[in-house]
Amino acid sequence: MSGPRPVVLSGPSGAGKSTLLRRLMKEYEGVFGFSVSHTSRNPRPGEENGKDYHFVTREKMQEGIDKGEFIENAEFSGNMYGTSKSSIEDVQAQNLICILDVDIQGMKNIKKTDLNPIYISIQPPSMEILEKRLRDRQTETEDSLQKRLEAARIDMELSKEPGVFDMVIINDDLEEAYAKLKSVLIEEIEKVQDAKK
Ligand SMILES: Nc1nc2c(ncn2[C@@H]2O[C@H](COP(=O)(O)OP(=O)(O)O)[C@@H](O)[C@H]2O)c(=O)[nH]1
Ligand SMILES: Nc1ncnc2c1ncn2[C@@H]1O[C@H](COP(=O)(O)OP(=O)(O)O)[C@@H](O)[C@H]1O
């Protein structure tokens, strides 16, 4: 297989994946490419179609799944999410490190493929802090918040099992978490940078 190894970022909703990702992609412009997932959930204020997600109807997404266009898909908090083959291919065609932000089900299904990514779990310091961050983010209804917390409990347990992830990062202090994330990825980052010279 050619090109840099992809990276799978997983962890509870609200753990800080998007925050860390945004920072990484800004600091290393031209090194990473985000695999833009499809979802049936509604866009949040500020989210762009085609950049944060491909926002689609359930019907449209099911059509794509039936046609075999997805490498994985899952139901999360009452909505469909999935990674299309082309979302990964688009990034890999540019020789960039492909970053996937997926839930546990996605992570497990990707393990069955030949993608061979680096698996990183971003975890909150505690359930209490996670709940506070999710509430402060003001993106969820009470119902979707509760569903996310329920999924988070399962996610937090799984992340403790040895061998599931290459690295588990506790996102307590943002600077420290970001430094750890960079340290796991620096080898791949340098490979991409060297290839450009
Ligand atoms: N399996 C799978 N999960 C995804 C995909 N895209 C996003 N997710 C996960 O879906 C969950 C909810 O994402 P989102 O609605 O954006 O909420 P947020 O993570 O709280 O910002 C998160 O755990 C994401 O990692 C995907 O393509 N496949
Ligand atoms: N280390 C941190 N300390 C305090 N707040 C944080 C930290 N990391 C992220 N946040 C905040 O927590 C919320 C959830 O983070 P976000 O990146 O949206 O999580 P995810 O993408 O995993 O759902 C956001 O409002 C974000 O600004």
Image (tube, grey):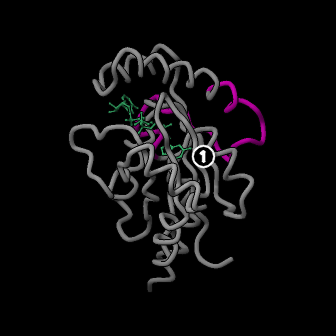
- Does residue 183 sit above or below 2 in this rendering? above
The residue under the point 55% across, 58% down is 185
* Residue at image mark 1: 120
Looking at the image, which residue sits at the far bottom?
197
Q: Assign the C terminus to one quadrant of the image.
A: bottom left
Numbered range of the magenta stretch = 156-178
State yes or no: residue 148 in magenta: no
Q: How crowded is mark 1: few (under 14 residues within 10 Å), some or many (20 or more)?
A: many
Looking at the image, which residue sits at the far left?
45
The residue under the point 57% across, 25% down is 151
Q: In the visual, does 113 lie left or right of 81? A: right
Q: Assign the N terminus to one quadrant of the image.
A: bottom right
Q: In the visual, does 44 lie left or right of 3? A: left
Question: How far across and down, in percent of the image, does residue 189 sit?
Answer: 51, 67
Q: Depth check: give the residue in front, 197 or 130.
A: 130
Q: What residue type is labelled 1?
A: Ile
Question: How far across and down, in percent of the image, does residue 147 sit?
Answer: 49, 20
Q: Depth check: give the residue in front, 138 or 122.
A: 138
Question: How far across and down, in percent of the image, does residue 114 sit?
Answer: 72, 64
Counting the numbered discs, the total is 1
Question: How far across and down, in percent of the image, does residue 8 sit?
Answer: 58, 51
The quarter of the picture where residue 156 lies is: top right
Q: In the visual, does 71 lie left or right of 113? A: left
Find numbered disc 1 in the image and state the secondary structure of the residue it sits on. Answer: strand
State yes or no: residue 165 in magenta: yes
Q: Depth check: give the residue in front, 197 or 158.
A: 158
The residue under the point 49% across, 28% down is 77
The residue under the point 27% across, 37% down is 44
- Does residue 148 sit above or below 44 in this rendering? above
Image quarter where ligand 2 lies: top left
